[in-house]
Image (cartoon, rainbow, N blue to C red):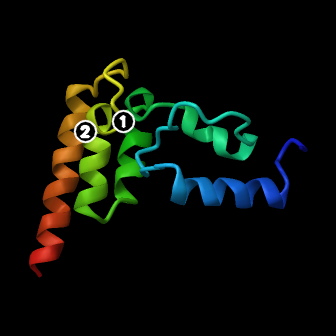
């Protein structure tokens, strides 16, 4: 496999996202060997992002269910060893939640 992975490798990952419990929280499920390099960007945990990058990531979320998965990623992924969100990150999550709720009411 090349540095960027082949089209076939990307198709395999696309299939894995649908069949192996990939939940959209930015976390890679355990037990996934041979992950192509273009997917390894998920190795950085959301709690390790700086506030600007974390806020930018949240801006892309427009669904309360997905936001809840991100907010509760340690429980959703059954990974209590993951770093907890900072107080600032929790505030950003709640702020985004209220923004989405306001959009839904309109």
**For this view, does 20 lie left or right of residue 41?**
left
Query: Of the numbered discs in the image, which one, if any, rests on residue 77?
Result: 1
Q: Residue furthest top?
A: 81
Q: Which residue is mark 2?
A: 72
Q: Residue at x 82, y 49 (%)?
A: 5
Seen at 31% across and 56% down, the residue is 66
Q: Is residue 94 above or below residue 28?
A: below
Above or below residue 10? Residue 48 is above
Q: Position of residue 30 (x, y in %)?
A: 52, 31
Instruction: Name the secondary structure under disc 2.
Output: loop
In-front residue for pair 90/21: 21
Where's residue 79, x and y in %?
A: 36, 26
Image x and y of residue 11, in percent: 72, 61
Please state the horizontal and vertical placement of residue 81, each as a whole percent of the image: 36, 17
Contact flag, marks 1 and 2 (Cβ < 8 Å): no
Quadrant hosting residue 78: top left
Q: Earlier in the sequence, mark 1 or mark 2?
A: 2
Give the quadrant of the C terminus: bottom left
Mark 1 or mark 2: which is in front? 1
Image point (52%, 38%), residue name: 28
The span from disc 1 to disc 2 (Cα, nearest Å) is 9 Å
């Amino acid at each position: 496999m090349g540095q960027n992975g082949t089209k076939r490798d990307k198709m395999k990952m696309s299939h894995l996202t649908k069949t192996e419990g990939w939940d959209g929280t930015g976390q890679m499920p355990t037990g996934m060997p041979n992950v192509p390099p273009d997917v390894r960007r998920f190795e950085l945990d959301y709690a390790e992002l700086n506030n600007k990058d974390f806020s930018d990531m949240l801006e892309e979320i427009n669904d309360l269910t997905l936001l809840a998965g991100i907010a509760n990623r340690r429980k959703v992924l059954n990974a209590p060893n993951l770093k907890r969100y900072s107080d600032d990150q929790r505030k950003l999550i709640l702020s985004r939640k209220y923004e989405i709720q306001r959009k839904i009411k309109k």
